[in-house]
């Protein structure tokens, strides 16, 4: 009976897109010491929604909790994770290299190349019941190539 009052997947997806469409999220389970402070010092660093992926004891998940718990975490990418919500697709790239979280200054480089260099993409064009995952970069590949291109001229 209680399930009757929960929003269905289509309603959850619609609400998520209304709130986060065209935006960038950082999905995490906590940050290393001073990492948030460094993020907020970056140009635009405070503009990313920070979503804690640890499950809360709530009867009804919010739309972002539903999407993270049901579709993003099962992909198995390391956290924290950069997610950009685009039309029909959510592009994902983890923020780890060699066992450590990258410096927040690299996020701008990751965003610049996210369309072509992401670890996974969730295609929601078929609706909430047909969300599919396409894998991209290998998990070990997390160098921001456009940064090296800019440095080398």
Image: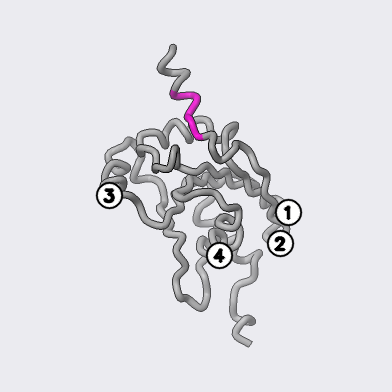
> Are the residues tagged 4 and 3 within 8 Å (C-beta)?
no
| Residue depicted at 55% across the width and 47% down the height | 85
Q: What crowding class fits label 3: few (fewer than 14 Cα within 10 Å), some (14-19), or many (20 or more)? A: few
Write down the region rendered in magenta. 142-147
Marks 4 and 3, how far apart at CA: 28 Å
Earlier in the chain: of badge 3 and badge 2, it is 3
Q: What crowding class fits label 1: few (fewer than 14 Cα within 10 Å), some (14-19), or many (20 or more)? A: few
Earlier in the chain: of badge 3 and badge 1, it is 3
> Are the residues tagged 3 and 2 within 8 Å (C-beta)?
no
Who is closer to the viewer here, 108 or 19? 108
Q: Which mark is residue 33?
A: 3
Who is closer to the viewer here, 54 or 115? 54
> Are the residues tagged 2 and 1 within 8 Å (C-beta)?
yes
Who is closer to the viewer here, 147 or 127? 147
* Residue 140, image quadrant: top right
Marks 3 and 2, how far apart at CA: 38 Å
Mark 1, residue position: 126
User: Magenta span has 54?
Assistant: no
Marks 2 and 4, how far apart at CA: 13 Å
Q: Which mark is residue 26?
A: none
Marks 4 and 1, how far apart at CA: 17 Å
Mark 4, residue position: 66
Left or right for 153, reference 60? left
- In the rendered image, the vertical position of residue 93 relative to residue 59, given as above or below: above
> Are the residues tagged 3 and 1 within 8 Å (C-beta)?
no
Q: For the residue labelled by badge 1, is the local secondary structure a helix, a strand or a loop?
A: loop
Q: Which mark is residue 129?
A: 2
> Are the residues tagged 2 and 4 within 8 Å (C-beta)?
no
Q: What crowding class fits label 4: few (fewer than 14 Cα within 10 Å), some (14-19), or many (20 or more)? A: some
């Amino acid at each position: 009976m209680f399930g009757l009052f929960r929003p269905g997947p289509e309603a959850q997806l619609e609400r998520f897109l209304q709130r986060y469409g065209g935006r960038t999220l950082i999905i995490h389970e906590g940050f290393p010491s001073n990492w948030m402070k460094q993020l907020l010092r970056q140009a635009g660093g405070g503009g990313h929604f920070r979503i804690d992926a640890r499950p809360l004891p709530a009867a009804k998940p919010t739309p972002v909790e539903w999407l993270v718990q049901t579709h993003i975490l099962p992909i198995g990418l390391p956290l924290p994770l950069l997610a950009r919500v685009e039309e029909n697709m959510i592009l994902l790239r983890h923020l780890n290299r060699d066992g450590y979280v990258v410096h927040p200054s690299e996020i701008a480089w990751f965003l610049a190349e996210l369309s072509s260099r992401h670890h996974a993409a969730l295609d929601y064009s078929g609706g909430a019941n047909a969300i599919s995952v396409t894998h991209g970069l290998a998990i070990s590949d997390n160098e921001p190539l456009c940064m090296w291109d800019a440095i080398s001229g």
